[in-house]
Image (cartoon, rainbow, N blue to C red):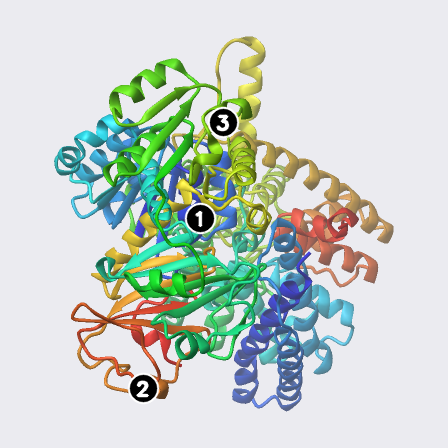
């Protein structure tokens, strides 16, 4: 295990986190929030200090193997969440550290689950930081690190693999650095466009930025207790469209803008993703007929909710807790499906679902005709056996963690739906669940233990399980 | 530069290892074996495409349209030629390099090259044979590289016990021996140095010297090393490399005896090499070797297809004769462990091929900005010797060398001015129009100004 290299990268992460806190720091200046300003100053200083100490460590070798990659990614996310929670505690906005840690994990993992009963009571700069963690966590902090740092030595692909979602992660370009830059460039441009469109809709800069950050990272922290409900229909439409856009594989955007357009429209995953959204909207529309005043309003709220849930954003304009059972069941299903691989969204990912469904079909067919050659194809190409195996193992691990986490939080004695959807919402990085954790409620009532378990679930879900499992497996640390 | 490498065998791997370390190459590897591609992609910062190089879709996916170079080093000659043909048709601007090893194709090599628009054809066997022939020309040296169109050479040799160079300061070579040579590198155990004047050499150090052609002979005479070239050689193994090597040696009047096991191949060689003595027998049988008079040959080359056999053969030969021994190795690479064995000169055809291609790729890059004329890996691949052409207005020209602020571990080893070779001392001045050889432990220099701090 190349400990020095791991510490080095952790150091860089802290420095970057410190630099990122400059944004809320500026915000606290603008709104003259002195206490918050001091808190950010202190934490930035701390991050830079510890970061510099860690980057000063001389590395003997820069080579990283798979295990270093996974462990580094897992540690980085725990670290940035731990440090990112400090401003909330120091400024007194969220007095309990565990609550603040939960909130920051929820931010970085782009979950959007909150322990705050009154969001509006929070200082503006704290709201900015909360939303900004979504944006940082969406594309991944290590991807950002790779875009700016000259990373010598081999094995950096493991970092990218461990941080980026999807069953098989590749590069867009031969150089990892160029790939990371392209991803961030697309991300930044999309975010800017959304900010401008929101500004045109009459929101102020603060509102536009926070909402755009929440959408881009598919996070879901809002700055009002009512979520997005009080904004104009125009804003709700913009957010709906951008949520769905950010749920699409960024590699496909690269193809669309820089390479052949055809690949974008031919992508199986994209087609299935859009088909799921359309059919979900349709079914819920029929199921909730009569609940909304006009067809436009119904479609707007339903499309918003479906987009928000499938991309695992978690914004809300309406309380879907009040919808009929079929609609609620569909919403919970969407929570599991999640967005496309390679997007900023969470969940199981559409491509995994496709592979799973296709392997079931394959199994049925080969059982009927054992001699027939039947392989799983996606986008016209054969899916590697390794990938299929990876998906199966992912599902197994996912189920085990899901059940274990649910058992632990059941100690708090909430009803089954609450427990089930609380884990669904955190492990899939969505935010709101049903009943006591519904869109108009929050996670404040849970015990500290449950909050820690759910914090773990959020990071595990964001990193797609294995980095976290590796970190806690003694076998990883064996010589 | 955008480089596509088709085929991930030993040569392909070596190429990727070398080229991916240089910042400005975007490398895409194409191979049909998913596991090999995966492994390389994990290890190096490159892109992998799984598929056949003769498949248009695969080449398109590897972005042949934007590629500057395509290197075809797949398993078969025909495959490589086919891939290059296809690549050239798909993208006019793409330079193609093919590995072709069959001697019969080599007869028509210029025809093939022109017709298919190939930029370069590499033949590992021929390259290795040339290298071996060069080593036999100068039996004391382990390795020879030539620069400045053959006017300067870098030779590597081991300081024997009791040699005058044992416990000798580098700067005393010029002062006490009066030899016009420069020590440009020293390997001690696993370490490599670029020595300063006060560096003290010891027995068993491997010394690389740079010298104008002819000068090295005088130097070797002064330190009491035999310099005469070999008169005859015994080769075990009768493959293609043996054919190329024997051909070359016979042309320069060196006697050749070849021991080959298969009768059929012996008959072929008999036809191909009328001047050579062909022996049909098992070269690994020491009775056969004794019968053929191994101890009377002043050089011995083991060229069988099995590495382990070659190692043992060479060790045996070393015990029987005091002559030059050359060992060919395909796969075994254990650096200093192999170096510690008494194998004489070791030749890695695949590394040579890779090196040759890297050199070509770098030279190609020249025209795109850098100005390296030739490049060699020396000191067991730990250092590079680069030849630069000095342009008008270069920051290192018209200044005394001692006043240049050079980076660490860099040596200006030689100046070539209008075919005159100058081994620079501190007071010499580099002029525009010169070519200069620089030895460095660092990699990736593109311009002569990179050597300055």
Looking at the rendered structure, which numbered label has been put on residue B427? 2
Badge 2: chain ID = B
Viewer-proximal residue among A124 and B175: B175
Distance between the Cα atoms at labels 2 and 1?
Answer: 63 Å
**Pointers 3 and 1 in contact (C-beta within 8 Å):** no
Instruction: List the residue tagged with mark 3.
Output: B289
Q: Is residue B451 visible?
A: yes
Chain letter belonging to callout 1: A
Depth check, mark 3 against mark 1: the one in front is 3
**In screen coordinates, is B422 left or right of A307?**
left
Camera-nearest label, 2 or 3: 3
Percent coordinates x, y for residue B80 in the rendering: 29, 33
Q: Is residue B109 left or right of residue B131?
A: left
The image quarter containing residue A50 is bottom right
Q: Residue A83: give x, y in percent of width and height.
A: 68, 72
Q: What number is the disc on residue A249?
A: 1
| Label 3 to label 1: alpha-carbon separation | 67 Å
Residue at x 55% of width, y 64% of height: A141
């Amino acid at each position: 295990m190349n400990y020095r290299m791991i510490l080095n990268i952790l150091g860089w992460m802290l420095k970057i986190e410190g630099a990122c806190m400059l944004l809320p720091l500026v915000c606290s200046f603008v709104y003259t929030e002195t206490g918050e300003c001091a808190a950010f100053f202190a934490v930035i200083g701390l991050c830079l200090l510890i970061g510099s100490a860690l980057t000063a460590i001389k590395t003997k070798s820069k080579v990283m193997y798979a295990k270093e990659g996974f462990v580094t990614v897992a540690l980085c996310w725990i670290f940035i969440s731990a440090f990112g929670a400090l401003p909330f505690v120091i400024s007194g906005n969220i007095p309990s550290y565990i609550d603040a840690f939960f909130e920051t994990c929820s931010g970085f993992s782009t979950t959007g689950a909150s322990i705050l009963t009154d969001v509006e009571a929070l200082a503006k700069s704290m709201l900015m930081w909360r939303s900004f963690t979504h944006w940082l966590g969406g594309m991944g902090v290590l991807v950002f690190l790779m875009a700016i740092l000259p990373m010598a030595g081999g094995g950096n692909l493991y970092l990218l693999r461990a941080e980026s979602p999807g069953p098989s992660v590749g590069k867009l370009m031969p150089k990892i650095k160029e790939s990371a830059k392209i991803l961030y460039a697309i991300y930044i441009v999309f975010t800017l466009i959304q900010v401008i469109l929101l500004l045109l809709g009459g929101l102020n800069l603060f509102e536009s930025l926070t909402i755009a950050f929440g959408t881009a990272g598919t996070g879901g922290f809002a700055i009002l207790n009512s979520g997005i409900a009080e904004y104009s229909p125009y804003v709700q439409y913009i957010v709906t469209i951008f949520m769905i856009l950010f749920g699409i594989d960024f590699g496909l955007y690269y193809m669309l803008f820089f390479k052949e357009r055809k690949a974008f429209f031919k992508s199986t995953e994209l087609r299935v993703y859009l088909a799921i959204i359309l059919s979900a909207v349709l079914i819920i529309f029929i199921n909730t007929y009569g609940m909304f005043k006009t067809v436009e309003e119904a479609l707007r709220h339903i499309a918003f909710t479906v987009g928000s849930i499938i991309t695992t954003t978690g914004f809300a304009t309406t309380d879907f807790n009040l919808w009929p059972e079929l609609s609620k069941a569909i919403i919970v299903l969407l929570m599991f499906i999640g967005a496309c691989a390679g997007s900023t969204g969470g969940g199981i990912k559409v491509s995994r679902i496709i592979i799973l469904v296709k392997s079931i079909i394959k199994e049925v067919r080969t059982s009927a005709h054992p001699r027939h050659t039947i392989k799983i194809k996606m986008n016209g190409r054969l899916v590697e056996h390794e990938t299929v195996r990876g998906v199966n193992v992912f599902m197994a691990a996912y189920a085990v963690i899901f059940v274990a986490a649910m058992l632990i939080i059941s100690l708090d004695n909430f009803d089954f739906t609450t427990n089930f959807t609380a884990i669904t919402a955190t492990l899939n990085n969505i935010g709101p669940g049903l009943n006591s954790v519904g869109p108009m409620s929050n996670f404040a009532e849970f015990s500290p233990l449950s909050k820690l378990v759910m914090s773990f679930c959020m990071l595990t879900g964001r990193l797609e399980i294995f980095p976290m499992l590796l970190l806690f497996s003694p076998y990883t640390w064996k010589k | 530069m955008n480089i596509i490498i088709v085929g991930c065998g030993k040569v392909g791997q070596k190429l990727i290892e070398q080229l991916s370390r240089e910042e400005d190459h975007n490398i895409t590897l194409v191979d049909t074996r998913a596991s090999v591609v995966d492994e390389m992609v994990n290890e190096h910062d490159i892109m992998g495409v799984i598929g056949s190089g003769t498949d248009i879709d695969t080449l398109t996916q590897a972005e042949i349209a934007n590629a500057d170079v395509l290197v075809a080093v797949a398993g078969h000659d025909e495959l490589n030629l086919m891939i290059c043909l296809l690549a050239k048709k798909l993208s006019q601007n793409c330079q193609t390099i093919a590995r072709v090893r069959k001697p019969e194709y080599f007869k028509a090599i210029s025809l093939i090259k022109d017709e298919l628009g190939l930029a370069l054809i590499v033949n590992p066997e021929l390259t290795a044979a040339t290298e071996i022939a060069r080593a036999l020309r100068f039996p004391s040296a382990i390795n020879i590289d030539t620069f400045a169109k053959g006017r300067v050479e870098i030779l590597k040799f081991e300081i024997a016990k009791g040699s005058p160079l044992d416990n000798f300061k580098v700067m005393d070579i010029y002062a006490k021996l009066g030899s016009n040579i420069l020590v440009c590198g020293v390997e001690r155990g696993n370490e490599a140095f670029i020595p300063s004047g006060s560096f003290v050499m010891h027995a068993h150090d491997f010394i690389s010297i740079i010298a104008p052609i002819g000068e090295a002979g005088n130097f070797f005479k002064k330190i009491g090393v035999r310099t005469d070239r070999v008169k005859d050689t015994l080769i075990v193994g009768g493959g293609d490399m043996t054919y190329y090597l024997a051909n070359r040696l016979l042309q320069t009047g060196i006697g050749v005896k070849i021991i080959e096991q298969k009768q059929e191949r012996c008959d072929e060689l008999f036809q191909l090499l009328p001047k050579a003595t062909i022996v049909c027998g098992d070269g690994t049988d020491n009775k056969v070797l004794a019968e053929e008079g191994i101890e009377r040959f002043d050089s011995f080359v083991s060229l069988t297809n099995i590495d382990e056999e070659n190692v043992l053969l060479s060790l045996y030969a070393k015990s029987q004769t005091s002559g030059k021994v050359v060992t060919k190795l395909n796969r075994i690479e254990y650096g200093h462990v192999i170096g510690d064995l008494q194998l004489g000169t070791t030749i890695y055809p695949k590394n040579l091929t890779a090196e040759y291609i890297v050199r070509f790729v770098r030279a190609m890059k020249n025209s795109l900005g850098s100005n390296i004329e030739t490049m060699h890996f020396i000191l067991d691949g730990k250092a590079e010797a680069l030849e630069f052409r000095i342009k008008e207005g270069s920051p290192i020209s018209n200044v005394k060398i001692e006043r240049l602020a050079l980076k660490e571990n860099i040596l200006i080893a030689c100046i070539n001015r209008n075919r005159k070779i100058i081994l620079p001392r501190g007071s010499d001045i580099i002029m525009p129009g010169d070519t200069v050889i620089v030895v460095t432990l660092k990699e990736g220099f593109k311009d002569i100004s990179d050597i300055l701090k």
